[in-house]
Amino acid sequence: MSKLTIGCFASLVGSMSLDFSVKLAEAAVEKGHTVDFWVSGNATMVAKTNQKSFQDYSSLAENFKELMAKGVQVTVCEACMEARGYGKEDTVEGMNRKSMDWFLASAFAADRVLHIGGE
């Protein structure tokens, strides 16, 4: 199988771009592909601990935990997180915090790269 790197540059939680990216990553990993999932900009809020789920509101915390359990490497932009006022201690366990260099290296090593979002 091949390696897919997804760069999600969506807006805050609730974005259809972010929801789509997660579903795409899930489908790819279920077909046996290796998936690296990069999140930056406002979408980094998905990595914030202690978020509350509401009925009829897109909350992806459980989806990301399932993806990571299936081997998807989820990495969030460290600078984007710090700019929004939360640090390493506020990050969901298992999610990586790296600089954009990580994303570029992952993209370089991937068979396919998708950039999603960027409103």
Image (tube, grey):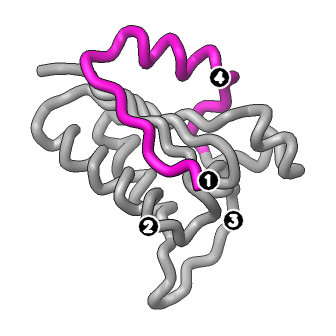
**Disc 1 element:** helix
Front disc: 4 or 3: 4
Query: Residue 101 lies in what quarter of the image?
Result: top right
Label 1 Cα crowd, 10 Å radius (few <14 / some 14-19 / many 20+)? many
- Asked if residue 95 lies in the magenta stretch, the reply is yes
Q: Is residue 118 left or right of residue 84?
A: left
Q: Position of residue 63 (x, y in %)?
A: 39, 59
- Asked if residue 106 lies in the magenta stretch, the reply is yes
Label 3 Cα crowd, 10 Å radius (few <14 / some 14-19 / many 20+)? few
Q: Amino acid at mark 2?
A: Met
Question: Which residue is under mark 1?
Answer: 43
Q: Which residues are drawn in magenta?
A: 93-119
Residues at marks 4 and 2, CA–CA distance in whole angstroms: 23 Å
Q: Amino acid at mark 4?
A: Met
**Cβ atoms under marks 1 and 3 closer than 8 Å:** no
Indicate which disc residue 50 carries.
3
Question: Which residue is under mark 2?
Answer: 16
